[in-house]
Amino acid sequence: MIKKLLKRIKCSEFANHFKILATGTLLSQIILVITSPFITRLYSPEVFGIFSLFVAIVSVVTPIACGRYNVALVVAKERNGESLFVLCLIVGFAVSLFLLMILFIGEEPLKKLLNAEKLHFWWYMIPLVVFLQSIFIALSSYANRYKNYSIISKTSVAKSIISVLVILALGFSGSSSNGLFIAEVLSSIIIIIFLIWIYRNFFKKLTLVSVKELVILAKKYKKFPLYQASSTSINSLRGMLPIFFLSYYFPSEFVGYYALVLKVIFFPLSFISNSVSMLHLKKVSEIIHNKSNAVRYLISITLILTAIIIVPMILIIVFGPQIFSFIFGLEWTVAGEFASILMPGLSVIFIVSALSPVFASTGNLMLSTIWYVVFFIFQFILFFVFSEKITIKDLLLLLTIANIVFYIIFYFLIYFAVTHPKPIT
């Protein structure tokens, strides 16, 4: 069945676009995987743990930095992409400035709450990274709107190369305490400059947009910040909850082990999943507009994603500790044990999250918001109740079970959204 499915989509537009994005994603992840054994020998689990807390805070805010108007930039039918692009940048700057004020005014209580005293100077770099990411999101969404997937693919590879080179250079020079942070900031700046140069003609033609026009656009697409931004923010916070709780209740080394699992398993899967979802967002929007068979398309993508993840999932579950100790060093064996526990849940997340843009494309944003809120509350209660009472491995096992159950429910909601589309505006 899978062979027939692959044969049918082999020459499709979706398949060609997916190849372009997947190639860039694959190369970027190969670079990270190949260099990870060197990085883990230059940077201790404690440093990984501190940096992962920095990334967790950034990751909670970044997805909503543009108010999710970047999604509207992709799916909107009318020709107002340039104005939506400007709106994304303005919202991104406003969110970053507001975040800076919060981190400055509430520095002492927030650092105590998050156990983030070890971030030191990098505490104030969080808003800068969020703003850089908002610019990158806006540029990537503009590229997605016009199906410039080769550019998105190239930036993925370039960012990985730049980041790895900086990390290794600083690690070998003895600056391992700041190397991961500097690499994140520097690679983001360089990639944004690259994208601006690529779209230099677009920026030359870009004119000032009146406040009135921006207000009209903001109101017209208010569902995106009201529903999708809130649900995305909650989902991002939910995804980072383990790091916040592990940072508070367990030593930094354990956070570092968990962070390595995210780096070499979850993040690569997320990159692939995001590549699919980027295409999926545009494709589902077109299918809905053309009133084609969206269910058949949904099942096809589900089978392909399942075929991609099944072998890696089995290998990590069975041989996780051995693989991690061999590749990253004996110091990281515990990370392999974490990976074995988490892999079933991460696999389900990989499959289902790639299909989540369905809610934006079908106008069912409220449906996804409800799911995000319920799952966030459940996961928060889980960590709040059990973090002090059970071992970290048992805690991660409960997290895996919760991920599997809730994401299966999420998949059925996706099916419902596809079969019950609503107007976007």
Image: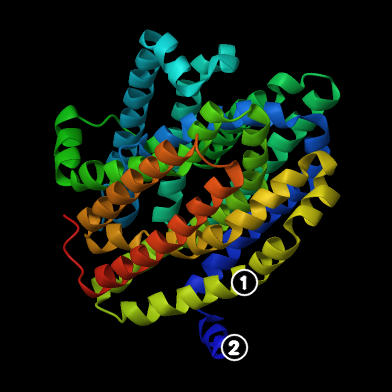
Q: Is residue 357 left or right of residue 263?
A: left
Give coordinates of residue 120: x percent, y percent.
Answer: 58, 12
- Residue depicted at x 69% and y 35%: 163
For the N terminus, the image quarter is bottom right
Question: Hey, which quadrant is residue 297 in on the image?
Answer: bottom left
- The reply to whether residue 202 is in sight is no
Residue holding disc 2: 3
Q: Is residue 360 left or right of residue 271?
A: left
Does dot 1 land on a helix, a strand or a loop?
helix
In this view, the mark in front (2 or 1) = 1
* Label whose residue precedes the other's in the sequence (2 or 1): 2
Q: Which residue, as the protein is rendered here, is positioned at the far front?
A: 389
- Residue depicted at x 25% and y 32%: 209
Give coordinates of residue 10: x percent, y percent.
Answer: 56, 81
The numbered mark at residue 389 is none
Give coordinates of residue 241: x percent, y percent.
Answer: 45, 38
